[in-house]
Image: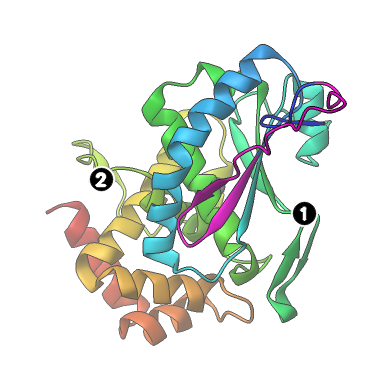
Amino acid sequence: MSGLHAPAGPPQPGVAAPAPEPLVVGDHRTVRLISLGGARTDVLLTRIGGDIGPAVAAVEKFWGTDWDHEIVVVATANQTQFVADAGLDPDRQWADIAAVAVADHVDLDHHQASGQRIVFAPGAWAMGDSALRIVLTHELFHFAARTGTALDAPRWLVEGVADFVARPPTPLPPDAAASVALPTDADLDVAGPDRSRGYDRAWWFARFAADTYGVETLHSLYVHACGPGHGDLAMAVQQSLGIDLAGLRARWARWLTR
Ligand SMILES: [Zn+2]
């Protein structure tokens, strides 16, 4: 494992190698960019180094500054490295995943996570600039929110909020109101194009909540619905939005068809 900014080769005797400049962004956060080898990973990490400042700013604006002050980003050179470093199940298909945010250990009771890192897949170098920025910011939100997210949190809301933080608010497609049901975790698990619609609907829901009740309230909904010790969705909606699920469904349907 070699650091992108690590000096190449052993230090020459008698020559003081200049210390690599640590990348510092946002609320005094240091960024470690780690290449697992290959020319493309260095190029990718250079682009990520350019995007990490705005990504941190977007996450801090939504989530605040109380999260890990060392950000670790790993670029992998092949799929085997990716699956291993990200700790993924090698028997499943990960070919369409650009990056993941993972941790070695999470202690929700003590608000601590160790070994947190964002791991990019080998194909990530081919992403366009805006797609790369979105993926980085999305994964950075998961990284920041790790110790504030229960293992059994509703995934659709976790993903919807991550996309709310990461994506520019592009107009909804004309058929956005084809379904006005609330998003569910099952929407994220279907195969094919319906899956990406499931993620989009989760993202639209987060936009709806922020539009209608304010960004602070969306943050509060995340804490009540996804945080450690969270209640069910109905309770979290009542606590943060002050309405019941029937009222929420009606407003969501109105927002989608507005
Ligand atoms: Zn995600």
Q: Where is residue 255 in the image (x, y as percent from the top left)?
A: 19, 58
Residue 213 lies, in percent from the top left, at 24, 73
Expressed as whole percent of the image width and height from the top left, the position of residue 152 reads 66, 66
Name the residue furthest top. 39
Q: Is residue 248 above or below residue 180?
A: below
Q: Is residue 76 left or right of residue 226?
A: right
**Closer to viewer: mark 2 or mark 1:** 1
**Residue at mark 2:** 169
Quarter of the view holding residue 142: bottom right
**Magenta span has 17?**
yes
Q: In this view, does 186 lie above or below 48?
A: below
Whether residue 155 is visible to the viewer of this picture, yes or no, is: no
Tell me which secondary structure the magenta stretch mostly adopts.
loop
* Amino acid type, callout 2: Pro
| Mark 2: few/some/many CA within 10 Å (<14, 14-19, 20+) | few
Q: Residue furthest front?
A: 14
In 3D space, how far apart are the residues under numbered discs 2 and 1 (Cα atoms)? 32 Å
Q: Whole-percent x and y of residue 17?
A: 73, 31
Q: Which of 17 and 77 is in front in this view?
A: 17
Range of residues picked out in magenta: 9-32
| Quarter of the N terminus within the rendering | top right
Q: Name the residue under label 1.
A: 115
Q: Find numbered disc 2 in the image and state the secondary structure of the residue it sits on.
A: loop
> How many labels sit on residues?
2
Q: Where on the picture, by quarter, is residue 14?
A: top right
Q: Residues within 10 Å of mark 1 (few under 14, many from 20)?
A: few
Amino acid on which the number 1 mark rests in the picture: Gly
Determine if the magenta segment contains residue 252. no
Classify mark 1: helix, strand or loop: loop
Dividing the image into 4 quarters, which one contains the C terminus?
Answer: bottom left
Q: Nearer the viewer, residue 179 or 147?
A: 147
Q: Nearer the viewer, residue 188 or 59?
A: 59
